[in-house]
Structures are given as structure tokens and as C-alpha cells.
Amino acid sequence: MTLMVPAVNVAALKDTTLLNMAIFALFVAVTMVIVFRASRNNKTAADYYAAGRSFTGSQNGTAIAGDYLSAASFLGITGAIAINGYDGFMYSIGFLVAWLVALLLVAELLRNTGKFTMADVLSFRLKQRPVRIAAAISTLAVCFFYLLAQMAGAGSLISLLLGISDWGGQALVIIVVGVLMIMYVLIGGMKGTTWVQIIKAMLLIAGAAVMTFWVLAIYGFNLSDLLGGAVETAKNPAVLNPGLQYGKSDTSKLDFMSLGLALVLGTAALPHVLMRFYTVPTAKEARKSVVWSIWLIGIFYLFTLVLGYGAAALVGADTIKSAPGGVNSAAPLLAFHLGGPLLLGFISAVAFATILAVVAGLTITAAASFAHDIYANVLAKGKADADTEVKVARRTVVVIGLLAIAGGIFANGQNVAFLVALAFAVAASANLPTILYSLFWRRFTTQGAVWSMYGGLSAAIILIALSPVVSGAKTSMIPGANFAVFPLSNPGIVSIPLAFFLGWLGTVLDKRKEDATKQAEMEVRSLTGVGAEKATNH
Amino acid sequence: MGHDAQETDAAAAVDFKEVQSTEQFKELRKRHRSFVFPMSIAFLLWYFAYVLLADYAVEFMSTKVWGNINIGLILGLLQFVSTFAITGWYVSYSNRKLDPIASEIRHGIEGHEFDKHGNPVGGAAK
């Protein structure tokens, strides 16, 4: 199939800035009204952190999809497929299959035993203080990496839309995004955040569906012809085969394995995803949420396959790479090619909304963890009243919001999906072993939990710091320096098995036995739902 | 938050160790684990087999089957299919085998109702 080589005029994008901003402003106005309405019932801590546990499974499932389909999924994966072909598809598969870990092993059991945060479950039958502190620290670390990725996405998008990479202009828009996010979370709490995510998920999936249909229509609904178009524009048949990005050397192949491991084991350990299971009234609704999100997320990733190859065929990798925003600009450029300024405006507004919603979700998770785990249970030794705790949470929101703004201003143009994969690696290393051990291994002890969490967390972070991501390569964060002694850019293949091993070692070397009664209580409650937190009535 | 205190109350009211040792609970645990453990191992093996093939068997994965559609793409799409299938399978298994027995045990020990904080209330009603 021969098509004219498309010319996307990047300079012409500037003319659409006003339109983009108008569409974005409309989204903000609508969601603000909803957040204000939702906030009227925010009375207790359960309201603020867990939306009164009053969402249905399908609402929560849509919100989870909204939380999970971040800028990484939309901008990052589309860009990765557009540039690296098949290797980008790998992200979609890992991100999706990972949900089975959450569905089968974690979601319902966690809903039955916890209250607000991941630490509630991890410290349930172990010693409160050390385990809570460790879980809160790893929650904050994972949220920080994830926030960095989202803010990098915001930066890319802004530079594309304004057609400039002017530092001051970008910084200003990141500040606006950050302030909006702080307002959503301050006013709306979990309920407001959830509604923003539901609306955003529907807009994002609808937008992607329209673009997918459009791309397929251009190629007569023939996937093979679309792939042929991508090969033709790229002048390289290898875009359809694995290995374009990761097949270069033995090291890069190992890196691919490491990425695959981190992706599939990371999801069920992401604190902001786990916290969403507390917004439904029962474990059965938690299960229903995961089923909904698996379907929505799966279908969306099938769309990104078409969008990625569509961008490769219709826009071309060279145009994408040279556009402001680089790899992450594939989806907006494709929208511009298909539907001109109006579709670009809509898609960009959706992408902004995506970043806003995900950042809000991360912020409330981090704030809840700080206020509930560190402040209320450790500093105030469980004596703080709920009002003070929520007050602390709100203050934390402002601090995290400011950190996110600063991080966003300094985040560079790395692929967003890649940065998120690092957050997955940190989550899988620091949290997953302890989550699984404490749910399924009767003998597991506090020492095992603490060794596994700190060991996994520090191994992951140290290996990232010593990897080509940070120094020693052209695309590094600090390109001038070279202290990259660890060759892989994703630490998962080392840090995840290490964390599992440390959890086992810490337990078998621990002379203390944990309370068997608490273990019995946790096991019975996790499987039957006895005494689980109920929904609040308004 | 009084988090610790309330859990102690709930634990004192219900003898969880006794519940844990009942045949009914053991059966629930067995049914749960005999599904989720083998299934998790199976999908992880299938996923890693796929990743290894994409990583080290590029020639094989690049074999064209129909037009420009190669084995790699088909196996990738099959990962989607298997994920959807396992999801559906688990839901139907839970509805049939896990939920009835779990709610039976729950009603058995919740002769005393739990309030919204998980504290037992009105312990007399059985």
C-alpha cells in the first residue's frame, strides 16, 4: 500500500495553542465542579482517604484504569512502538499481564485486611513500628519515581504544544498543572480524585478508540497493511520484529529480561493502585474492580499497538524524534495528522488530564501514607485523632505538590514509559516480597519484612543511580559524568530476586516468633472478610 | 486512630485460631490456594517464555504467518487473550467455589455483627 509520505508541520502546531488551552480549561472547569460536589461529604478519615468505601466495583475499576493508564501508557508506549516497533509492544504486554498478580494474589486479600494504606496490611501481624516505617518509606519512594515520570510527560507535552522548549514557559505551565492538582486533592480527597480519574479514563479510552478506528480505516481495516505502512515509512522491516531496541548486545538482551520482570511484578506492589482497593465496600467489589480494569486496560493497550504503528507509518520516526518532546510526542503528532488542530487539541487536553489525574492519585497515596503511617501510627503512637491526621495529610499534599512541581521542571525528555518502568522495579523490589510473604507464608517475621523492604528498596535505587540511566551515556540524566558501573538500565533482575531472598533469609535467621494469633486473624480475615472495614453511610 | 486497640478488641471477641483450625476454613484455604498458585505459576511461565523468545529467538518470532503479521505479534496478542481468559476463569471459580464457603464462615463467626470499624457489636445475638 503506497501512501504519500506525510508532512507534519511542527511549526503549525503553535497556532493551535489557544484551542488546546480552551479544551483543557473546559475539562478543568467540569472536574472542579464535580470535585467540589464530591467534597461535601468528606467528614472522616475514611472519607478523605478511601472515599467512604462507597464506590462500586465498576466505578473503581474505571478509576483504576484511569490511574494506571498514565502518560506512560498513552504517550510513552505509543512513542516506543512508533520508534522501536515491536520492542515497545512489550511494555503493553507486561503492564497488562501484571494485573493477574493483583487479581489472583493480592487485591481481595488486601481489601479484607487493610484500612487505608499498604502498610496496614504489611504491619498487620508483624511489629507495627519498624514495618510501618519501612512500608511508608518505600511508598514515598515509589510515588516519587512515578511522579517524576508523569512530570517528564507534562514537560514533553508542553514543549510540543507551545512548539518551544523555552525553560521559563514550560516551568510556568508545570506550575499551573501542579497547583491544579494540589487543589483537586486538597478539596476533593479520594472521592474527588476518583471522579477525576473516572472521567479521564473515559475520555482517554474514547479518544484512543476514535484514533484507532481512524488509523485502521485508512488501511482498510487490514492490520497487515498498517504494519506494511510502518515498514515502508521506516524503510526498515525490522520494526515488526523483536530486538530493534533491546537486541543489540547481550547486555541489552539482559536488560530486556530485567524490564519484563519489573513490569510483570510491579503492578501488584504499586501503593497508589493498592490504595484504590479500599474505596470499595467489599472484597467481591474489589475483585470486580480488577476485572473491569483488566478489560479496559487490555483494550486500551490493543489501541496503542495500532496507534504506535500508525504513528510510525503516517508520521514517521524521524519526524517524531525531531519534534519538541521527542519520543513522547508520537500520539499528539498522530492526532494532528489525522484530525488537524481540533483532534490534536482534544488529545492533548486528554493527555494533560491524564497527567493531572495520575499525579493527584499519587499525591493522595503519598500523603495518606505519611499522615496515617508515619504521623498517626509512629510519631503520635496511634493517639492522634482523625481530624488531626487528615489535617496532616492535607499539609503533606501541599509539600508533595511542590516537590512534584520542582521535579517536573527539572525532569528531562526521557521516555515516560521507561521512567515508569523504574518505578515498577522499585515497587516490585521493595514491596512485593513482603506483601506475598505476609499473606501466604505463616512463618514470615518482622526481621524478614524489614530486610526485604530496605534491601529491595536500596538495591533498586543504588543500581539505578549506578546505571546508564543516570550517567555515562548520551541520554543519561547527567551526561557529563560517568559512574555507571551497573550495565543494565532496569535493576529488576537483580533487586527483585534479592528482595525475595532477603525476606526469606531474615525470617529463617530470626529467633523471634511472630504472634500466631495475629497470623490466624490475618489469614481468616483475608480469606473470609470477617470484620473487614465497611462502607460509611451518608 | 486507635487502630491497634480496635484490632485487639476484634481479636479478643473472635477466636481466630479456632476458626483457622476448622475443617471448613482449611477447605476454603485449600480451594483458594489450589487455584491461585498453579495459575500464577502457569501465567508467569507463559509470560517469561514469551519474553525469552522475543529476546533470544528473534528469527523465529519474525517468521511471517499472514501478510506482515509474524509469530511475535500473534504470541503477543495471545498474551492478551490468555490474560482475559484467566480473569474470566478466576471470577467464575470464585463465584462457585470460594464465595459461598467464605460467606458461610463469615456468618458463622459474625453472630455478633461488626460495626464499621471492625469492632464486634451486640455480641449476644447468635
Image (cartoon, helix red, strand yellow):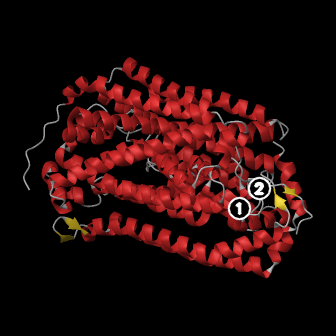
Residue depicted at x 19% and y 59%: A221
Residue A309 vs B112, above or below: the answer is above
Choose between A110 and A23: the one closer to the eye.
Answer: A23
* Residue A394 x, y percent position in the rendering: 66, 30
Q: In this view, does A397 lie to the left or right of A45?
A: left
Residue B75 figure quarter: bottom left
* Residue A350 x, y percent position in the rendering: 38, 38
What subunit carries mark 1? A
Circle 2 sits on which residue? A124
Residue B26 figure quarter: bottom right
Q: Distance between the residues labelled 1 and 2?
A: 9 Å
Q: What element carries label 1?
A: helix
Residue depicted at x 46% and y 50%: A490
Residue A357 vs A62, above or below: the answer is above
What subunit carries mark 2? A
Residue B71 vs A373, above or below: the answer is below
Residue A244 is at least partly visible in this image? yes
Mark 2 crowd level (few <14, some 14–19, many ≥20, 10 Å Cα): many
Amino acid found under the numbered disc labelled 1: Ser
Q: Residue A438 carries which label?
A: 1
